[in-house]
Image (tube, coloured by chain):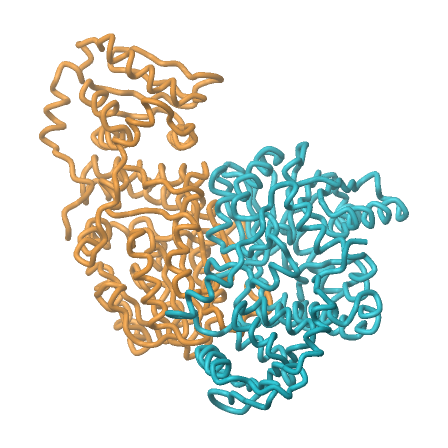
Chain colours: A orange, B cyan
Amino acid sequence: MATPNPVFDQEKADARRATKGFQGSDRSRAYERYLLTRVIHAMAPRQYTVELWDGFRIEPSHGSSIATVHIHSRPALTNLLRQGDVGFGDAYSTGEITVEGDLIGFLIQVYQTPEPKGIFKVVKRAQQRSPRANTQAGSRENIHHHYDIGNDFYKLWLDREMQYTCAYFAEDAMEIEAAQQAKMDHICRKLQLRHGDRVAEAGCGWGGLARHMALHYGAIVSSWNVSAEQVRYATDRAKSEGYDDRVSYVLDDYRNIKGEYDAFVSVGMLEHVGLDHYPDLGDVVDRCLTTEGRGLIHTIGRNRPRLMNAWIEKRIFPGAYPPTLGEMMDIFEPHRFSVLDVENLRLHYAKTLEAWLSRFDASHQQVTEQFDENFTRAWRLYLAGSKAAFLSGALQLFQVVFTRERNNKLAASRAHLYS
Amino acid sequence: MATPNPVFDQEKADARRATKGFQGSDRSRAYERYLLTRVIHAMAPRQYTVELWDGFRIEPSHGSSIATVHIHSRPALTNLLRQGDVGFGDAYSTGEITVEGDLIGFLIQVYQTPEPKGIFKVVKRAQQRSPRANTQAGSRENIHHHYDIGNDFYKLWLDREMQYTCAYFAEDAMEIEAAQQAKMDHICRKLQLRHGDRVAEAGCGWGGLARHMALHYGAIVSSWNVSAEQVRYATDRAKSEGYDDRVSYVLDDYRNIKGEYDAFVSVGMLEHVGLDHYPDLGDVVDRCLTTEGRGLIHTIGRNRPRLMNAWIEKRIFPGAYPPTLGEMMDIFEPHRFSVLDVENLRLHYAKTLEAWLSRFDASHQQVTEQFDENFTRAWRLYLAGSKAAFLSGALQLFQVVFTRERNNKLAASRAHLYS
């Protein structure tokens, strides 16, 4: 198993706890209160309270307070002021910052903060992190950081098909298990998958979609992934369940995809590809797709170009970047791929995260035993923050269907997705 | 009524006919044959024949010939070599170039010509036309050129609701009348139109969609258009049919749209807006859309940035430009509008044009009486060329649904479009 992440220096955190600051006997200083007040006021309108270890409080800018952010130590405050999101996330993980009340409501308000102006813009820019490089070696490292922390951990809170991407709640009352099945069916229908179709999948997670395509649509699937843990899980399952003649999982980079395919699919990988490599991905698709082949890319996205939240990029998803639709065109335009259909499933991801979060909370004890409290707090913040990001519109979920420019064998309408 | 267009100098054309070249008694020269052969060979693969007035022929590069392009005069050849598409279109209009056999098949092959290289790239670039300016005065002039040539003319070959945009063949066997109704319903459903909703329409043609929204969905519609002929027709009809309390047609530029609306719609106008003005259009939408408002833009587009065919831009649609999806983001990104749905209806436009073309051909005699043979030939080339462009993938048809980033009152899925 890989090193648990996010990685914290537990000794340092313990040392901080032992300082007077954390004990509350040392009063906050005037310049600290001044700076914090300026930062928090710039985030108005807000309906939450901020409270320091010595009782100093910043009240909501209007209405009643839905949450209180407790900053328990001077180092936590200093890091928050210096490093913004990274400082907040790290201090939340060590317990030096806690949120009492409606965590997700608070995070939504943070995501809805107006774009910073003046000095805050300069500071924000300095705090942002460019995604780490996604060369083949870099991608391997980046993916290892997140996906190789243990299949047992993900089993605790994902569905039984281990779908770690946005589900599709075709009907409002669906449970997560059914919604993940519906997502896979929705994708297969969008790809007009037929018995015997050869499919190339770039980034297959624990292999659920490939499995689904083979078992329910009779497809022959080759799936690429650089996460050793995931490929091992998927391959073992294919062998023991007896469909390894129809699905092969390849531990390699998407840039090395070989062969000819009737469909290309990539669900939740583009976030890890990196803008610089979008043309490479387009080249891969162009190389492997037949004349009448269909493609689908499913990715988290943005309405306007903006880097990933710096804490998430640093601690959770190194190298990640959610693109705008416009940025995605670097995949399609060079080969004149024709975009046939774009669907935005933003609120479906909020519902997915709600389900994950409630299962994660139910497994709190086990996660903490597998790792530690810091890890559990960090992951909880990441899941809650992601839900808030989708609810607030800071993140989108795009499913893009495309084909070659000259392919005239198109579905007459999209009605077949809903029959 | 405006000057008929495309505008040709009939005297000049008659003079050409009187030259020996047109009569065929003057033989083509070695350098003319050399240049033409180079140009035509660069367009391979092709299954058509080219023949000069003196019988000189260039055979297909492979297979049997589906059409013969007859170049009847030296001036036509010179203009074709010099001006490319403009030379071809003008000579086709005067009858100095004719196409025997499968015109649309020939045009598809022209559209599928590989991108020119080397000297041909330089020549092609010189032959291209940047779209004319779309300032408010410019737009008025550009729109007048096309849409004010007489409502009686358009009545001859459009459907009874005068829909001059891509229809939606919800079922394969639909006739054009039903498919235009289906298009309007599809748009209303995509906009989740409800009784009493206020709608702003930018570019309303002869007012059909506004009429449909008011009569079938109970909407209150304000429609902007700079074509005086169209606004007159639409207003007269609203008055005589008695729904002018619910629909108002405004003879003004979309940049002057005022008021607050639950929905914004624009069908077939973006082609005339011009890339430079996309942010203006975004500003208009941002100014007039409510918090939970929905928007839809329906436009001809491209898979990769490319100017409009030069002859169409010069003779038929001054100022026109079909954008890529990426280019359209200049409307949405500055205000962080969230793209919810993109549907590509390319082949529906090919079917629409097929229907128009067959009605146009049935009205050949009347069109020629209203204008002249040159006009009829030019419009036939424009309609046939457009059909070929959609069939070949040179043109796309995008319907883009969007809303504000923070609007969470979204349809749970798109199933309601198909129920």
Residue at 82 percent of width and 50 percent of height: B233
Q: As displayed, is residue B178 above or below residue B77? A: above
Q: Could you say which quadrant of the image residue B364 lies in?
A: bottom right
Q: Position of residue A363 (x, y in %)?
A: 29, 43
Q: Position of residue A24 (x, y in %)?
A: 20, 13
Asked if residue B291 lies left or right of residue A168, the reply is right
Mark count: 0
Q: Quadrant of the N terminus of chain B?
A: bottom right
Q: Position of residue B123 (x, y in %)?
A: 45, 66
Closer to us: A60 or B209 = B209
Residue at 44 percent of width and 52 percent of height: A398
Asked if residue A1 lies left or right of residue A278, the reply is left
Q: Is residue B227 visible?
A: yes
Residue at 27 percent of width and 35 percent of height: A128
Q: As displayed, is residue A344 above or below residue A63? A: below
Q: Quadrant of the C terminus of chain B?
A: bottom right
Closer to us: A153 or B134 = B134
From this viewpoint, which residue is outermost toward the right?
Answer: B240
Q: Could you say which quadrant of the image residue A87 lies in?
A: top left
